[in-house]
Amino acid sequence: MSITQLQHSLEMITQELTAVYKFAPNTSPEAYGRAEKMLKSGHFTFTDDEIDDFLPPALRKNKPTSGT
């Protein structure tokens, strides 16, 4: 590849990376440390309530009672 082609490729990769970072969650060192600690201690699963937060109401395990 020529220098011009390499420069163009680098520019395209940089633009794609910038777009990915734009939508990535902002992670603080504290949040990273908490996540690392939980993963190292074997907490690889979600609670039922955490799973319910991702699901539509009809599929939730802990469905809200009527009137709430």
Image (cartoon, rainbow, N blue to C red):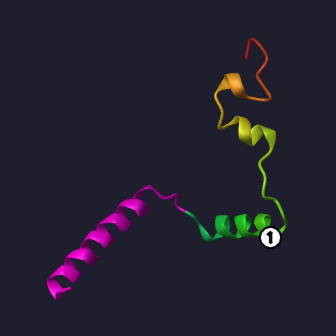
The residue under the point 68% across, 37% down is 53
Q: Is residue 43 above or below residue 59?
A: below
Residue at (74, 12) in percent of width and height: 67
Q: Is residue 8 magenta?
A: yes
Q: Is residue 45 left or right of residue 11?
A: right
What is the quadrant of the C terminus in the image? top right
**Of helix, strand and loop, which mostly describes the magenta segment?**
helix
Q: Quadrant of residue 59?
A: top right
Describe residue 12's horizontal placement relative to residue 55 as left or right. Answer: left
- Residues drawn in magenta: 1-26
Residue behind mark 1: 40
Count of labels in the image: 1
Residue at x 44%, y 55% (from the top left corner): 23
Q: Position of residue 52 (x, y in %)?
A: 72, 35
In the picture, measured across the screen, residue 50 lies left or right of residue 22, that is right
On screen, residue 48 above or below 7: above
The amino acid pointed to by label 1 is Lys
